Amino acid sequence: MNIAYFLRFWPQFGGGETVTRVLANELCKRNHSVSIYYLWDRTSGVDTKLDSRLKVRKVEGISKTNIHGVIKKCDYKLIEEQFKDFCKQDNIQIVINQWIPANLCLNIVKHLDVKLITCNHGMIKFVPAKLKTLKEKIFYTVFGDNAGFLRIYWKYKPAVKYSDRYVCLCEPYVNDIIKLYHVKDTTKIISIPNPCAYAEKSKDIINKKQKEIIYVGRIIDIKRVNLLIDIWRSIQEKSFAKDWRFTIIGEGPDLDTNIKYAKETNCERLSFEGFKNPEEYYERASLFVFASCQEGWGLVLVEAQIHGCVPIVMNSSPCFQYIIKDGESGFLVKDNDINAFSKTLEKIMTDSNERNKIAVKSMNSAKKFLASNIVLEWEKLFNDLVNQ
């Protein structure tokens, strides 16, 4: 099968790029011809370990962008022309749109003999971390619980209507899309979870665990790292936590704000590591904490599990129940309940036997998200489309 992924950045930026690298490598191993078409270079210096058979093509001559990857309308025509040429050169049969605006993508594929798969990497309902402007406050006050759906209605509509398949990350999101857009052919809206970027680990890793809690991810408002700092501050002086430390791995626009906040609130044994390869932290840490208010999947939770690093998560997204079975492969805590989160931490920090049991169950649970398993779902989808 000849497959092309459409992206803004390559080879690194966020979860979408990580997932693309993992799936592209796995598909190459299974003798598919895989191409990456993208707009801008973005790398952190971490080895991306790309399969040598992967074809990578970059659009030339377009404007520079900001950190969010906004595409200027004046560049649309050039992008359309080059992406079309790439598809023809590589005899593409299936296009997977990861991050290109729907209208731009549809203009590219409408004159090509290809099947289009659009991926939605987020929650369908938009939930801001905080209402920052008067306009937002009025909008969410007037429309209440429906505001989160109304805000994204026009953004997703073209892709939902014209894609051959629209792929969400879990079943509740499929139901949201079908209900929101009154989709008649419900078979075109499906769910496939993201694959783990790491291979299966030996259970011996649990014997090497240290008394360390970690967070891995971008430092942006929706991740609510400030809540994790508050939680750590609430337990750091208690006797059970005296020989534990908290490490934050990641960068983003709110990094300096959170560093300052941690200092002002007298946090101890808390370090900010910036952007690093997280694997060594997953391997040595015992616990992983997460307080995001909006998460499409939570790839870092599976990464933590595969390393026997027990996740403790504020239950803000329906996807978390597909990753974590509360009390068995991690912990789901009521959203925004700092007190309950602190108590859950205390319980697991003070019971090493229980912590190790859950670590083993976490590792077993994460196996279903290994790339070698998830790629089978994608291959089934490709075959269904080509044989229509």
Image (cartoon, helix red, strand yellow):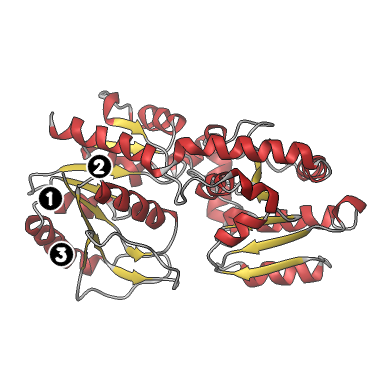
Quadrant in the rendering for residue 280: bottom right
* Residue 387 coordinates in the image, percent (x, y): 13, 30
Mark 3, Cα crowd under 10 Å, few <14 / some 14-19 / many 20+, is: some
Q: 90 and 64: which one is in front? A: 90
Q: Secondary structure at mark 1?
A: loop
* Residue 57 coordinates in the image, percent (x, y): 20, 66
Alpha carbon of mark 3 to alpha carbon of mark 2: how far? 21 Å
- Pointer 1 residue: 92
- In this rendering, position of residue 339 left or right of residue 32: right
The amino acid beneath tag 1 is Ile
Alpha carbon of mark 1 to alpha carbon of mark 3: how far? 20 Å
- In this rendering, position of residue 293 left or right of residue 234: left
- Pointer 3 residue: 77
- In this rendering, position of residue 303 left or right of residue 39: right
Earlier residue among tags 3 and 2 = 3
- Pointer 2 residue: 117
Q: Are marks 3 and 2 in contact (CB under 8 Å)?
A: no
* Residue 101 coordinates in the image, percent (x, y): 29, 54
Taking the spot 37% from the left edge, 41% from the top edge, the residue there is 372
Q: Nearer the viewer, mark 3 or mark 2?
A: 2
Q: Nearer the viewer, mark 1 or mark 3?
A: 1
* Residue 274 coordinates in the image, percent (x, y): 59, 70
Mark 1, Cα crowd under 10 Å, few <14 / some 14-19 / many 20+, is: many
Q: Are marks 2 and 1 in contact (CB under 8 Å)?
A: no
The C terminus: image quadrant: top left
Earlier residue among tags 2 and 1 = 1
Q: Secondary structure at mark 2?
A: strand
